[in-house]
Amino acid sequence: MKFVISSQNRDAYKTVLSKFEVGYVALYGQRLSIRDVGNSWVLIDQNEHRDTVGGCCLTLSTVDPFKTKSREILEKFDISPVQNILTLSNIVTPRGAGRGSSSHISKKDLKNFYRDLYEMVSNFAMGKNQEIVLVELEEEEFMESVFSGLWPYSYYTRCDKTHTASGLLHLNEKTYQKFRRKWQSIDHFEEEKLKRIVLG
C-alpha cells in the first residue's frame, strides 16, 4: 500500500507513520518533522506481507542558499533557485526501517523498492504540476537510487566534504519511457536467467 502523508492528514495514518519513524530515527538520529504548512509530505510504501515500510520526504520550497551544489545544478539548467522547487530528501529503505530486527530485505526487493519509489515521486510531482525534482541525499543513499533504482538523473554531483550528493530529475514522457525500458531489459534478463537455472 502507498500513502501520501502531510500535516493535514497525519493523524489518520499514525500506525504506518510510526513505523516509518522507527527507520527514520535509526538512520538520521532525530525525530521526523512534518511541517504544519502545506508544503511538506512523506511518501510511504508499505509491504504488508513483509511488514516493512519505506519512503522519502518531500518539500516544496526555495533552495537553501548554503547548499551550493544544489544551486549549481539548478543554475546549470537555468532554473531559478528562488522559485519553489520540489525537493526529495531522507530516503528510508525497508532495510533501514528494520534496523535492529530481522526485517532486512533482499537486493531484489531493494531494487523494487527504489523502482516503486521513483514511480511514486513522479506521480506525486506531476499531480503538483512540478516538472522537476531536486534530490538531496547522503552519498550512499544517492548512489543506491542510481544503481539499485536506475533513477534517470539529468545531472548529479557529489560533495566529498559533506559526503552528500545532489541530482536533478526531469519528469517528462521521454525520460519516463527511458526509465521503463531500462527496467524492462533487466526484467527480461532476470527471467531468462531463472529459466536457465530451472531448466538446467
Image (cartoon, grey):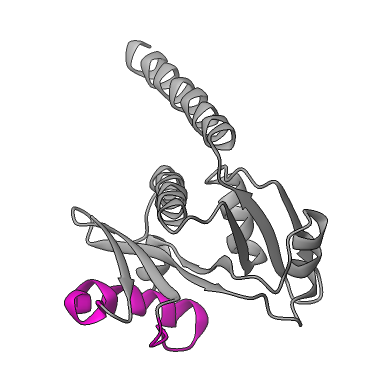
How many numbered badges does the structure rendering display? Answer: 0
Query: In the rendered image, is residue 101 in sight?
Result: no
- Prevailing secondary structure of the magenta residues: helix
Residue projecting furthest to the top: 199
Instruction: Pick the quarter of the image with the C terminus.
Output: top left
Closer to the camera, 50 or 5?
Answer: 5
Provide residue 30's location: percent of width, then percent of height.
Answer: 47, 89
- Residue range in magenta is 9-37
Left or right of residue 67: residue 59: left
57 drawn magenta:
no
Query: In the rendered image, is residue 112 in sight?
Result: yes
Q: Residue at x 42, y 42 (%)?
A: 108
Vertical comparison of 7 with 157: above or below: below
Q: Residue at x 65, y 47 (%)?
A: 153
On the image, which quarter does residue 56 sit in?
bottom left
Instruction: Pick the quarter of the image with the N terminus.
Output: bottom left
Q: Residue at x 81, y 76 (%)?
A: 161
Provide residue 190's location: percent of width, then percent of height.
Answer: 44, 25
Provide residue 76's location: percent of width, then percent of height.
Answer: 82, 56
31 drawn magenta:
yes
Vertical comparison of 50 with 28: above or below: above
Q: Residue at x 38, y 70 (%)?
A: 42
Closer to the camera, 92 or 88?
Answer: 88
Closer to the camera, 10 or 91?
Answer: 10
Left or right of residue 93: residue 171: right
Left or right of residue 196: residue 132: right
On the image, which quarter does residue 135 sit in?
bottom right
